[in-house]
DNA sequence: TTAATCGGCGATTAACTTAGTCTTCGATTG
DNA sequence: CAATCGAAGACTAAGTTAATCGCCGATTAA
């Protein structure tokens, strides 16, 4: 049970899109090449991000992707939800309604299962944490963690290839 | 991306084991029948719970399962970890070490990826919440949520079939 | 205008996982 | 000794994941 690799791909790619001015964009090809990722698959990932309104595409040659809103307004959770969908991690197949007692005395007040509620509220704790971290926060964090050299080289890579 | 149904099966089954005295046990067959679950599959789930030291088995005819420690000391997270394994939900394939810059200037200080750290710490929030809820807590919760009648009927079901 | 380059999208695939079954085994009961 | 239980492993069918391929429409530059 794990999130798909698409989540990792997406988050890492979005880092490079944060600084891109709104009249520019970065192509899938560049993003894939730079990170050593399969280009076609990355294209699918960006399809989901696009549908979720996180990025917007620029069609045609010299096209690519850019953020479709401020990095301040894109949280980690937004990205995960775009890739993985809205379903909770805990899978409740409502087994308590298949139970002996429920089969016997048929008409029950449709109540929530306590176990399910516990799981969902625990997940919410994780989501709240992810909702509190935005892409712009991540950008600042990376500025303080990564060497100035590396960050500069990265930006140079994407700017030169899109001139 | 979801936890397997085994987690739901396990948690629901463990509810019925909380009150069982340490010289008694409940058989897989009863648990499966009562909840309308496939018996053979449930047996696999209990295999995992047994390996994790949550339940212990009583072999032979009239055998079954019982808790192998106090319900106070069994948390929701213990159960999930027993079924799903210890791996984090977020899958980090270390893609940053396949990147262009890392391929170029080869020898890097082996650093952690900030994105990964964010994800892991968010997961930890969820796990902490699940670690704080034990089976005995769940039992009390169910006492206040479910009708006295249902709880009694349930206990009767398992006691009469194991006499 | 036209060829080359981009993203969008759907079909397809291979590998893997999940949910579940079957069968054989060893232990216990009566 | 036979019937009943759990343990364990082989097996299977269905679903998912990661990835590829091919075709389309939009865009650009020659
Ligand atoms: S019925 Fe699904 S968790 Fe209780
Ligand atoms: S390398 Fe895996 S999350 Fe950054």
Image (cartoon, coloured by chain):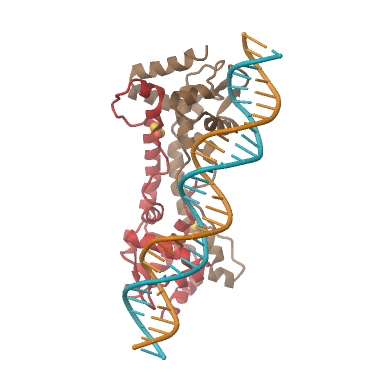
Chain colours: A red, B brown, C orange, D cyan
Answer above or below: position of C8 versus D9. Answer: below
Q: Which residue is painted at 32% across and 61% down in the image? A: A53
Q: Which residue is painted at 47% across and 17% down in the image? A: B158
The quarter of the picture where residue A140 lies is bottom left
Instruction: Give percent across and percent down for residue A50.
Output: 35, 63
Instruction: Give percent across and percent down for residue A83.
Output: 40, 55
Instruction: Give percent across and percent down for residue A42.
Output: 45, 64
Q: Which residue is painted at 33% across and 32% down in the image? A: A112
Residue C26 or residue B15, whichever sits in front: C26
User: Can residue A32 be seen in this snapshot?
Assistant: yes
User: Can residue A140 be seen in this snapshot?
Assistant: no
- Point out the image quarter for the C terminus of chain A: bottom left
So how many labels did they put on this image? 0
Q: Which residue is painted at 50% across and 70% down in the image? A: A34
On screen, residue A155 versus residue D27, left or right, reads: right
Residue C14 or residue A19, whichever sits in front: C14
Answer above or below: position of B96 versus A88. Answer: below
Instruction: Give percent across and percent down for residue B51.
Output: 60, 33
Answer above or below: position of A129 versus B158. Answer: below
The quarter of the picture where residue B67 lies is top right
Residue B129 or residue A142, whichever sits in front: B129
The quarter of the picture where residue D27 lies is bottom left
């Amino acid at each position: 049970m794990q999130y798909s690799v698409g989540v990792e791909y997406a988050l890492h790619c979005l880092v490079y899109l944060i600084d891109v001015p709104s009249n520019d964009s970065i192509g899938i090809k560049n993003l894939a090449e730079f990170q050593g990722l399969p280009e076609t698959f990355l294209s699918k990932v960006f399809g989901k991000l696009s549908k979720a309104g996180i990025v917007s595409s620029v069609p045609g040659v010299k096209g690519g992707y850019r953020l479709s809103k401020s990095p301040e307004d894109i949280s980690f959770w937004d990205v995960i939800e775009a890739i993985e969908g809205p379903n909770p991690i805990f899978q409740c197949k409502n087994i308590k309604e298949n139970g002996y007692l429920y089969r016997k005395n048929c008409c029950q007040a449709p109540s929530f299962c306590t176990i399910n509620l516990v799981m969902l509220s625990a997940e919410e704790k994780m989501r709240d944490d992810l909702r509190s971290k935005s892409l712009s926060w991540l950008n600042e964090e990376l500025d303080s963690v990564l060497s100035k050299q590396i960050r500069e080289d990265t930006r140079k890579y994407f700017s030169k290839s899109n001139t």
